[in-house]
């Protein structure tokens, strides 16, 4: 059983397109995250949701819009894709109160051409 | 603003050696610290989680220590194996409700 699963794993798309990445966790966690790992391998937080509510929204273009239909899902929609959006996007989850370990998905490799 | 650094950026050792990876953070008011492993083209796998009240955690050949007052953590790997080759990242969390801030990682190569 995959704890945190995200789809698609690989995505190649043209500039200007709109795309979505989906994430689901089956760990019963109440907090989910989106991280971006750039070409230099730095991992940076983008968004965090706790019980479907946005609690962290770092400085990212408003072309990026997260949506959490329920506690187990956090999707990332990206409008008007740009070359600089090419990166690996990681979904993760944890339990906010107990400080439990954070679990990551396998990543979604986005290439904008 | 919390900043996390890791030294060295890359490390290459022969199989069987014991080694230490270092992590430093600027704000000592942390909730916990976590060490991860990332294999090429893969996601992150949690190795050890140290709560702020703890000094160290051990799992198999891995031992992580935490010195909050000096803003440091070390990951000790005993009897390294080629399968340990990966990038090791540390991450700190300030409070519950806060995100994890990651270091840039140390790329480890263990040569057979």
Image (cartoon, coloured by chain):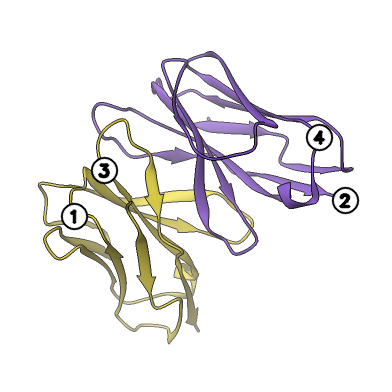
Residue in the picture at 24% in, 37% down:
B95
Q: CA distance from mark 1 to mark 3?
A: 9 Å
Name the residue at the top extreme: A69
Residue A2 at least partly seen:
no
Q: Mark 4 or mark 3: which is in front? A: 4
According to the image, label 1 marks what residue?
A: B28
Q: Residues within 10 Å of mark 3 (few under 14, many from 20)?
A: some
**Numbered disc 4: secondary structure:** loop
Q: CA distance from mark 1 to mark 4?
A: 40 Å
**Numbered disc 2: secondary structure:** loop
Left or right of residue B4, residue A46 in this image: right
- Chain A drawn colour: purple
Dot label at residue A113: 2
User: Does residue B2 sit above or below B81 in this rendering?
Assistant: above
**Numbered disc 3: secondary structure:** loop
Image coords of residue A8 (percent x, y): 73, 35
Q: Residues within 10 Å of mark 1 (few under 14, many from 20)?
A: some
Residue in the picture at 43% in, 39% down:
A103
According to the image, label 4 marks what residue?
A: A80
Are callouts 1 and 3 both on one chain? Answer: yes
Left or right of residue A24, residue B68 in this image: left
User: The chain coloured yellow carries which letter?
Assistant: B
Dot label at residue B94: 3
Q: Residues within 10 Å of mark 4 (few under 14, many from 20)?
A: few
Q: Earlier in the sequence, mark 2 or mark 4?
A: 4
Q: Mark 2 or mark 4: which is in front? A: 4
């Amino acid at each position: 059983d995959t704890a945190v699963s995200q789809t698609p794993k690989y995505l190649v798309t043209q500039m200007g397109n709109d795309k979505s990445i989906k994430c689901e966790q089956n760990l019963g966690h109440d907090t989910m995250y989106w991280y971006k790992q750039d070409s230099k391998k730095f991992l940076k937080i983008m968004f965090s949701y706790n019980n479907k509510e946005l609690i962290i929204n770092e400085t990212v273009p408003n072309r990026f819009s997260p949506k959490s239909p329920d506690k187990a899902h956090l999707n990332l929609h990206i409008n008007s894709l740009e070359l600089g959006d090419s990166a690996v996007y990681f979904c993760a989850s944890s339990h906010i109160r107990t400080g439990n370990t954070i679990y990551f998905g396998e990543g979604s490799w986005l290439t904008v051409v | 603003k919390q900043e996390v650094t890791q030294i060295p950026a890359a490390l290459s050792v022969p199989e069987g050696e014991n080694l230490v990876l270092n992590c430093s953070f600027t704000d000592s008011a942390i909730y916990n610290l976590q060490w991860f492993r990332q294999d090429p083209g893969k996601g992150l796998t949690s190795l050890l989680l140290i709560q702020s009240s703890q000094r160290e955690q051990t799992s198999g050949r891995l031992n992580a220590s935490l010195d909050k007052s000096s803003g440091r953590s070390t990951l000790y790997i005993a009897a390294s194996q080629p399968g340990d080759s990966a990038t090791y990242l540390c991450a700190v969390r300030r409070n519950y409700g806060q995100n994890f801030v990651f270091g840039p990682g140390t790329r480890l190569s263990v040569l057979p």
